[in-house]
Amino acid sequence: MAARVDGHPDNAAASVVGGLVAATFVKGAVRAVRMPLDGGLVFVALVPDRALATSKARQALPREVSRADATFNLGRMALLLAGLADRSLLIREATEDRLHQDYRSPLFPEAPQLLSQLLQAGALATCWSGAGPSVIGICEASDGEKVRSAAEAVMEDVGVYGRALLLRADLDGLIVNDK
C-alpha cells in the first residue's frame, strides 16, 4: 500500500524490509528483494535547510538519454551494489553519474563542492540522495564521525546551512509490536 501511495516502491520497501533493497513494480505488484549490505559502512548525509521540490528536480532532466550514458550508469550501479555488499570493493567511481546529478547541479550549485569535500574528508564514495538537495558520503564506520565533522565545517564554509548526520543502515525495517 505504501508503494502505491508514494509511487516509489524502492522507498516503501526499504522502510518496511530494512537494509539494502531493490524494488519495483512487476506486473502491477511490488517486487522487493533484500540484498547484502556490509555492516562496516555508515553514511554521512548532508541535509541542507533549503528545499528542492522533486518536481523541479525532475524538470531539470533531459527527456532522452544516450545509450552510452544509460550503459555508463548501469555499469556504475553494478559497481555500487558490489561495493555496498563488500566495502573492500567500493570505489569512488561507483557513484559517478551521467543521468541526473550534473543536470540538477544548477538547482543546488554547491553540491559538486560538497561531494568533493566529502571525498577529501575520507568518504569512499559520494552522490546526491535521490533528487536532492541532500547529498551523502558512504564511509567506513571507523571514519564516519571524522567525515561528518569535516562536512559540518565545509557546509559552513560554502554557506550551506543545515545538518550533517552520521547514519547507520536500519537492517530490521518495520517491526510490529502487538502489545
Image (tube, grey):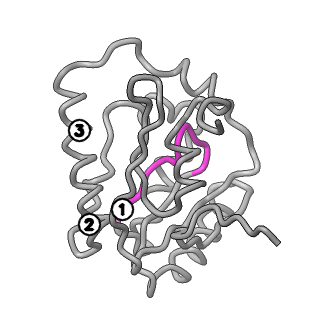
Q: Give the range drawn in magenta.
A: 125-134
Q: Which residue type does callout 2 highlight?
A: Leu
Task: Indicate which disc, 1 or 3, sits on the residue closer to the N terminus.
Answer: 3
Q: Which of 146 and 113 is in front in this view?
A: 146
Q: Give coordinates of residue 9: x percent, y percent.
A: 52, 38
Q: Count residues near mark 3 (Cα–Cα under 10 Å), then give few for <14, some for 14-19, many for 20+.
A: few
Looking at the image, is 112 positioned above or below residue 148?
above
**Are the two marked residues, 1 and 3, in contact with CB atoms closer than 8 angstroms?**
no
- How far separated are the C-alphas under marks 3 and 2? 16 Å
Tell me the SS state at disc 2: loop
**Are the two marked residues, 2 and 1, in contact with CB atoms closer than 8 angstroms?**
yes
**What's the mark number on residue 74?**
3
Residue marked by disc 1: 125
Residue 158 sits in which quadrant? bottom right
- In front: mark 2 or mark 1? 2
Left or right of residue 114, residue 48 in this image? right
Residue marked by disc 2: 90
Q: Count residues near mark 1 (Cα–Cα under 10 Å), then give few for <14, some for 14-19, many for 20+.
A: many
Q: Which residue type does callout 1 highlight?
A: Ala
Q: Residue at x 35, y 30 (%)?
A: 99
Q: Which of 177 and 39 is in front in this view?
A: 177
- Hey, which residue is sitting farthest top in the picture? 63
Looking at the image, is 89 positioned above or below residue 70?
below
Q: Which residue is drawn at 53% across and 53% down?
A: 14
Tell me the SS state at disc 3: helix
Q: Give coordinates of residue 114: x percent, y percent.
A: 52, 56
Task: Indicate which disc, 3 or 2, sits on the residue closer to the N terminus.
Answer: 3
